[in-house]
Image (spheres, grey):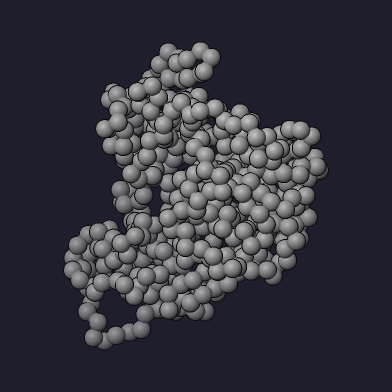
Amino acid sequence: MKKFLPVLFLLLFFLITIVSSCTPDDPLAPVYKEDTNEYVNDWIYQQMKKYYRWNASMPDPGNLSVEPKYYFAGLLQKNDIYSYAMHPALPETAPQSLRRRFGFDMSFLEFQGKYYGVILYTLTDSPAKNSGLQRGQLITEIDGVKLNKENYNQLYQKIVASDHVQLQITSYSSKSGFSVSKEISLLQGLSFSQPVLYTIIEDKKTKIGYVEIPHFDVGQAQLYLQIFQELKSKYVTEIVLDLRYNGGGDISSATALSIILAPNIRSGDLFIKFEGNANGGTINQSFLQALQSNESKISFEALQNVHPSINKVYILCGNRTASASELIINNLKPYMNVITIGEKTFGKDVAGFPIEDDRIPGKKGWILYPAIYKLFNSKQEGEYSKGINPVKQVDELQDPEVFALGNRTEVLLNNAINAITGNTNKMKTAQSQSLPLSVINLDTDPLLRMIP
């Protein structure tokens, strides 16, 4: 009998009634020795055949003797970049990102024929923050290698896989130019729950509430309640929600925020449709059901009572906006006007739950994080695996001078303010050019990655 890990993000008690966690005894099934690749891979195949969203296209079991990580990868649909398997005793099997390793996100740009890494985001109390890194700083060298057009992508992937890195840092101001460079050394370390930044901006007698959410953590409903109670008491009439660096998280926290934002909704209104394979079927969740999947202390009514006087929301987004953040964008559309500003989102339109191999008592085995459900809104709109295009396309790196989040001069926020106030002044011509990355490593917390 296999037991699931506690699932914080989906209504697993619904799933248990739909799909049995036991496989029927088969006297003809081969028996493999414990701790062998065959023992592990046979289990992996059976779980994937039962739960994987695209199980119908899986190959035959094949060679069970290969390493489990590679065996699992061989079962995936070609375009599935979300599913993964990891072993708690093998750290190298866990997905990695700059955000998880060092506590920052970065991108690259070209300015006046030179190439720079740009610090986009730093986590509070992270190795990056504690070492002095902050948004807007420019990287000229990584581990002693000067950045150029040919090597920036390779260097990025290198530091994602490293446990320490040396960065040569400078800053740029349109008034004073580049600062004297300095070296910063980072060691891998942990970052924990992050604060939610919010402020009130007044422009042309309009009060705008700006809220930046770095991640949807478990139990954030109480925090959203307090923030929006204050915004409502200050008579805010416009909301700008900054999700450009939010890679997802707890579905109940994302739902709590959606309940606050959406006008005139009822608790029973359909919010999310989970579409699984033939075994899992389709699960429909109302706003209330999605909230209660992992939130028992804050009621639907309490959240609805702090709804500000809005019928639209401005959402700042980009290629690191994923999962639960994309769910909010897509699933609020049937209930209000969602105006997205920035760049195309990441494109994570799947959800799932962890499946642990606990067949050997007292010994931790492999954990699978497969894509189990495709996500849709109440109008059956979804299929955004290639990302959600913004209503207004804007590159935040128009200039090497990158302002702090929440600063009204910052490019995306400035665009939102202009849209709200009707200011038609055009932004200045871009002086820099953003450079694409072949792979963006999102924040990949193993307990959250496959959950919206």
Determine the residue positioned at 80% across, 42% down.
235
| The N terminus - image quarter | bottom left
Against 227, residue 259 (above or below) is below
Q: Is residue 203 visible?
A: yes
Splitting the image into 4 quarters, where does residue 291 fall? bottom right
Relative to 223, say whether 332 is above or below. below
**x, y (%) of residue 89?**
32, 52
Report if residue 6 is visible in the image: no
Q: Residue at x 52, y 39 (%)?
A: 394
Whole-percent x and y of residue 318? Answer: 49, 44
The x, y position of residue 376, in whole percent, is 53, 65
| Residue at x-position 72% and y-position 63% | 265
Decide if residue 209 is on the left or right side of residue 182.
right
Which one is nearer the viewer's eye here, 416 or 188?
416
Looking at the image, which residue sits at the far bottom? 27
Along the line of sight, the residue nearer the viewer: 143 or 258: 258
Q: Give the camera-side residue of 448 and 136.
A: 136
**Residue at left offset 23%, top offset 77%:** 31
Q: How many marks?
A: 0
Q: x%, y% of residue 81?
A: 36, 56
**Left or right of residue 385: residue 402:** right
